[in-house]
Amino acid sequence: MQILRYALYRFATMLLTLWVVSILIFIIINLPPGDYLSNQIAELQASGQSAGVAKAEFLRKEYALDRPLWQQYLIWAGFMPGPHGFSGLIQGNFGWSFEFDAPVADIVGDSLWMTVMVNLAAVLFVYLVALPLGVLAAARARTWVDYTSAFVGYLGLATPNFLLALVLFYYGHKHLNLPIGGLMDPIYENAPMSWDKVKSILLHLIVPTFVIGTSGASAMMQRLRANMLDELGKPYVETAIAKGMPPRRMLMKYPLRVAFNPFVADIGNLLPSMVSGSVLVSVVLGLQTIGPDLLQALKSQDMFLSAFVLMFVALLTLIGTMISDVLLVLLDPRIRYEGRKA
Amino acid sequence: MSALFAVNNLSISFAGSTPVVNDVSFALQAGETLALVGESGSGKTLTCRAALGILPRTAKITSGQINLRLDQGPVDLLRLDKRSLRDIRGNHVSMIFQEPMRSLSPLHRIGNQVVEVLHLHGGPMGAKARQKVLDVFEQVGFPDPERTYRSYPFELSGGMRQRAMIAMAMVARPKLMIADEPTTALDVTTQAQVLGLMKDLQQQTGMAMILVTHDLGVVANMAEKVVVMHKGSVMEAGDAAPILDAPAHPYTRALINAAPRIPEAPTPVTTQPKEDVILELKSVAKTYKLRSGRGWSAPQMVHACRGVDLALERGKTLAIVGESGSGKTTAARIALGAELPDPGGQVLFRSAAGADALPVHAMDHATRLKFQREAQMVFQDPYSSLSPRMRIQDALTEPLEIHEIGDRSSRREKAADLLRLVGLGPDMMLRYPHAFSGGQRQRLSIARALMLDPKLVVCDEPTSALDVSVQEQILLLLEEIREHKKLSYLFISHDLAVVARIADEVAVMRRGLVVEQATPAELFYNPQHPYTKALIAAQPEPEIGRPINLKLVAQGAGEPGSWPEAFRFAANDAPPLIQLKPGHKVRCHV
């Protein structure tokens, strides 16, 4: 019950934060002088294409770019009726991409889900790799196991992701016949979901997951190892040994449980760093995630598109922190029962 | 009959260096209590840990045997394979550790951690195991075992956690319980109750006990046999009574002499009215708001100090004694101006006899600087109160630099002088703190406090982190310096015996209130308040003939409602502090 209340409270603060973030994003997007349309109009006028100018002017009106900035924001967010009534983010209208001349929703549609999928796979990879390796490195501290995993970890941290991507593509294709680039075989694009399509996607996911996840996994592993080592020196571990617990069971039940907290708290940080960190990788690997879209949109001042992508990343971050906060409360009675009388 | 547990010629060393435990032997019978006594570094803890195979990784057992008599015959614990050793741990031999705050996992319920012992050793499962644990909880004195079962460690006080540890150590009915300084981290009244409990339980169950301790008072109260260790070797061993009454070995004698105790014969008391008061606390109170963390419920008020009136005469020592949470440290912090008292309270400081009384909390910048020079502090923990990255020279001269007194060479000269005064050499100036022992570090902190030639020094438990023999030296040093430098001390302590020798006046605090105030002699021979009586009774004395009077402790340390009529609280209002005779005040109704 208490936890539900906390979750609701966290959700409310998340919405509030999202609102503040939306203002910040809108301001930042509008900081560079001019916008996509005025740039285009200037260009068209210079080359004397008046038909294009008319369309651009029309779009300017259509998307209220001729209004003051604060009104633009309210219309974009959906707090104020624009030329077409209430039609903003809240109402589910993400705006128009001038660059691609299509609604933002159509452009990002698929890549949105691809982004979520690639990053979820990477997060999963990070946890699956870091958890056992970190525990093992701590339990066998200062032995070859520890040193080897630390070495591999630092290697993972130090290698540039895109380089790793290219290397893995080359050897993965040569020896394991793994596909190069993309997130599925071109034949399945726009095809309905089928078993073969899923298989193709999974096969294509292997290298990107590995590439995006390695540095996160090695950082996380080192943190978990350090936490575990701290915990292993604490008296309650000694108590558990003196009870007669077998080492493995002791390790799992006591120190790991305590060392797990920071591990969980990291979920929130992991998501955004992966999304922004994977832009370059996505470009190199030719993944249809929103990373490349964002890059392109920012370059050409395609403001609605870039604003939407940024909002999406912010949302992912906020959801991540919310999940980790709620999990922490579930995991740690010290937080849960704060103030309960003994 | 052969011994239940016997250590034979045990030697332990750390990676090739000289042995830290050297040829130690002792034995105990079923149902006996043996005390392993020694100061830090004596190897007493390592000896016990060797029995359960929980030595630090780098420690190597170089020789010896540790034999335990089981039903199926004796085994050598040092030569058991890991699996069989695990069957012994917690089942036949269990252990209690020093820090109850940290010896239980913070994230698991108490019941879960205790019942686990039964599960590990093939005991009953399910509801039967739970019932057994609840029975043990009741046995160790939990008023509501069901609730304790569900509680997390952070919901219990230190004494209650140690009871939970004892329950964990007992639940499998071991033949031997090893208790490593089980009460050192506890308040003295709690210590008395926990010791009483351990003794009772031992009588009920007939298990043997090894008590590792540095406190001869605890030994006298608990043990039948004593092994005195020093630097890894056994100095003296045998029955407790003769060793404590007539120690044969000089080290044992020194240890017994160093143990602080409440003096035997009353000295005549003459109390003169205070003439030259250097520091005065007038109706000082401090209330902290405890935020509930939820934001909806009203904040809780915690009264750390209530109506404290104290006066320290120049050249004397005023001691504030109390257990954790009594408000003694808050009072000291307010006295130094580190914290603001609630409105209405006032702290006055007189720099010299006849000088104007300055309000500590309403000074302008210049007066405050001057006050800070004249009032200094010695802290409790000598390990963390010196910066590990500063040479002794820099740590000592820093106060002079801050106050821009003297030049480089005169500052260093002064530092050298003070090092000599506290019994260290000026040749140590360039060392870092890690090169010093605990006692030496406390000497350094004293030297640092004296660098500005203060008139008032606040000592916050300056000896509680030290061994008894070192504690004795530091107290001597503090006394010498007081005479030599004409200092006045505000001395904060939880230990009545320490205070007995150094203080001219003692104020006993409990939950923010001064309950009794008198000269030490008056206080110890004519204590009036039940809480003072409990504190005195709870003090373990290194004499077999004076066991702790648990009844007195339980009553005085309990809730005010259990006190005799005259001392009880009316609703939430404490009775007034009444002067019984000159220099002796008690909080009671007349």
Image: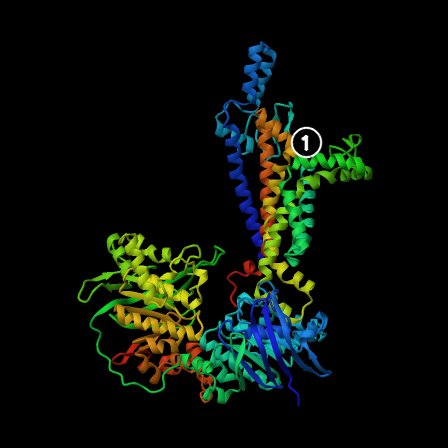
Where is residue A130? Give x, y as percent: 66, 50
Relative to A11, B272 lies left or right: left
Q: Residue at x 69, y 74 (%)?
A: B79
Relative to A110, B357 lies left or right: left
Where is residue B433? Give x, y as percent: 43, 60
Q: Chain of mark 1?
A: A
Label 1 CA crowd tier, 10 Å (few <14, some 14–19, many 20+): some
Relative to A30, B51 lies left or right: right
Relative to B508, A198 lies left or right: right
| B337, A244: nearer the viewer | A244
| B4, B573: nearer the viewer | B4
Question: In the rendered image, which quarter is residue B464 located in?
Answer: bottom left
Where is residue B440? Give x, y as percent: 41, 66
Q: Can residue B309 be seen here?
A: no
Determine whether B505 is above or below B358 in the image: below
Q: Residue furthest top?
A: A48
Determine whether B98 is above or below A224 in the image: below
Question: In the rendered image, which quarter is residue B428 located in?
Answer: bottom left
Q: Which residue is mark 1?
A: A284
User: Which quadrant would the N terminus of chain A be assigned to in this image?
Assistant: bottom right
| A332, B166: nearer the viewer | B166
Q: Residue furthest right?
A: A196
Q: Residue furthest left?
A: B354
Question: In the rendered image, which quarter is residue B391 located in?
Answer: bottom left
Residue type at mark 1: give it: Val
Circle 1: element type: helix
Q: Give the colour scheme shown.
A: rainbow
Count of numbered circles on the image: 1
Where is residue B198? Give x, y as percent: 55, 81
Determine whether B315 is above or below B221 in the image: above
